[in-house]
Structure formats: C-alpha cells, structure tokens
Image (cartoon, rainbow, N blue to C red):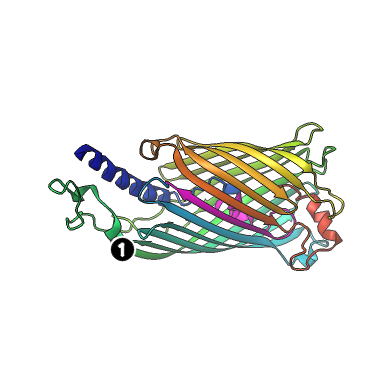
Amino acid sequence: MLHYLENKIFGVFFLILLSFSLNGQDYQFSQFNKAPLLINPANAGMGKGYNRFNLIYHTQHPTSNFVFQNYHFSADGPIFSHKMNTSRGYLGLGFHAFQEKSANTFSKLDIGITLSSYVDIDDNNQLSFGFQTDFIQHTINTSSVQWASQYNNSLGGHDPTINSGEAFFSNSLITFNTATGLLWKNSTKDQNLSGIDIASFQIGYGAFNLFKPRKISLLANDRAFVRHVIHGRGLFAIQELKYGIAPQFLIQKQGPHFDATAGADVKYYVKGDTKYTGFVRECNLGMGLFYRYNDAIIPKFSIQINDLNISLSYDLSVGPVNNFNGTVGGFSIGIQYNDTYGVLFNQGNMHVVNRSRKMRKL
C-alpha cells in the first residue's frame, strides 16, 4: 500500500514536471496545421483564398489528477485585398489566442498579433515573411500540488500541512514575446480528373522567443529558450483516382528539448474543387496516421464540406509517460474554415478566383 501511494504521488509530481517541460517547449498540438500562427508567423494570410479561421480543443493526460486542457483560436487573411488583382505583393494580418489550464493549478494565456508580407514570385510560387508579438500570462497555484516531500508515513498518504520545501520566485508572471518566420509555397495549376492537385506543397521556418522571455520556475530569472521550427505539408493526387495523399511534418528544437511529428492523411474526394469558378465546392473524407517522436501514435479522421473542415484525433501514448497513463494520451478536435472566395466580408470578385488558383489546397 505504501509503495502504491508513493508511486501515485511520484506519478502526479512527474506530470507536473512534464507540464513545466512542455511549457519550456511552448506548444505541442497533434493537429499542428490548425494552429498555423503558432508554428510560423509567415503563415498569416497564406491560407486557401481569403480569410481563415481555426479552433482547437485538446486535452492531455485525462487519467491523471492534473488534466491539461488547451484551447486555441486564430484568424488570419490578406489585407488591402481590393488590390489583389493589380499587384503581386500583399500584406497578411493574423490574431491568435491560446489558453492552457490544469484545474486550479496551472494556467497560461497567450494573445498575439501577426503581420506578414508576401509576394507572388510567379503563378506557382509564393514567398512570405512574418513577424509576431505576444502578450503572455502564467499563473500557478502551488497549494493544490501534492509534492513527494509531503508524504506522511503515519497517515499513509499526502499531508498538506507538511512544508514541501519547494519555493517559486513568482506564482504569477506577465511577459511579452516575439517571433519571426519564412514560408515558401508552391501550388501547381494541374489537377487530375477528380479535381485534385497533381502536386502542391509548402515548407517554412519559424523562430520564437527571440528575446528569451522569463517564465515561472523554481530558478531565479529562468528564461525560455529560442524555439526553432521547421514544418512542411503537401497534397498529391494518386494518379487519376479520387484519392489524394497529404503528408505533413513538424520539427521543433528548443534548448535541450526536441519534438518531431510526421505522418500523412489519405483523402477520398466525393467532389473535387475547381480552379475556374466558385460554384463547384470541395467535399472529402480523410483518414490519417501520425507519429510524435518518443511520445505518441496519433490516428486522425477528418471531413471537409465546402470551406469547412472538421478533424478528430487521439494521442496513444508510447513514450516514457506511458508508464503513468497507459496509452491514454489525449483527445483533440480541430475546426478550420477557409473563406476561399471572400464572401464573409464582401471581398470576393472574379479576381479572387484567379488568386485561389495558386492557393487552392494548402
């Protein structure tokens, strides 16, 4: 019994340390492409067509005493869009809000604005540069944490009256952050008979925490490492069939921390898109499988109807944390809406269709 309780307390303590480690690594989403501004500021305004909206709910470690819930919202799109048909250079603007919570113990709020500048190199290629600034607030309630040093042999369990010996320099912290990034995007004009791109892809690099902001820690003046991100995605038609394959990858390096996720979706197109008018709209079903290095296997299901895409995924833990939560890693739902033809704010005109030929799928 004593051994069991000690392991339980250590397991909770381990998850707390894990949360701090993930905080040190900034963000970790299974559906990372539905958080485009958190992986590269150059993504602002580079969605399909005009405006793009993303919403993510992600839960981690639901079998533990510290369930982490992540909420993310972002919106981005081109500005000065009335000049889209007369110039090859545009500006993009983005907004995001992110919150991570664990009951009444830990909370992180991140609100940011992103500005990008991008240029059409030719009819198939675009290059974008972005800059981002964030307001970040961290809070932690240490009184709700069960530390291993508070185990009471006589009680046979946790005793909150025992001094844990752990002292944080601050339980609340407000900081500002900055990031920058580059993105190259290639979109072919060629489609197969089912309306799927023959080959479209993009690759980018982002750098976050440029001025190494402070963070809540047991150490004085502890600062976040710069987070380096390399990411890519594509869409390729499978011959003349109604199937497309969409490989994706994300690599992050932040100080001693390393994170890599890779996999692919296979999509079945009930109806393909068209590059000539906005009246034939896309509809597809997708099944995907991804692997996050030394952490999780992630099956995924998605459905797209017109401009709305909804995807569900589940993290099956396979890394060290598997010793504490079994395979129960967490559930995620992602929703993306692409205003392909600029109908939301009456931006659309025939020139939007011309632009969407170069930005159809990614």
Query: In the image, is 24 to the left or to the right of 342?
Result: left
Question: Relative to the observer, which residue lies in front, 315 or 46?
Answer: 315
Q: On screen, 260 above or below 96?
A: above
Residue 338 placement (x, y as % from top left):
70, 56
Q: On screen, 325 above or below 81?
A: above
Q: Is residue 214 visible?
A: no
Query: In the image, is 94 to the left or to the right of 140?
Result: right
Question: Relative to the observer, which residue lies in front, 301 or 255?
Answer: 301
Residue that appears at 53% across and 42% down: 314
Residue 117 placement (x, y as % from top left):
67, 59
Q: How many marks?
A: 1
Residue that appears at 41% across and 60% down: 107
Residue 1 within the magenta-colored segment of the rendering: no
Residue 236 placement (x, y as % from top left):
73, 37
Q: On screen, 189 above or below 41?
A: above
Question: Relative to the observer, which residue lies in front, 123 or 314?
Answer: 314
Q: Secondary structure at mark 1?
A: loop
Residue that appears at 22% across and 37% down: 3
Q: Amino acid at mark 1?
A: Ser
Q: Is residue 49 visible?
A: yes
Query: In the image, is 267 to the left or to the right of 168?
Result: right
Residue that lies at the very extreme toward the top in this rendered image: 239
The magenta span reads 34-61
Residue 50 within the magenta-colored segment of the rendering: yes
User: Which quadrant, please, contains the N terminus?
Assistant: top left
Mark 1 Cα shell of 10 Å, populated few (<14), some (14-19), many (≥20): some
List the residue tagged with mark 1: 170
Residue 213 placement (x, y as % from top left):
42, 59
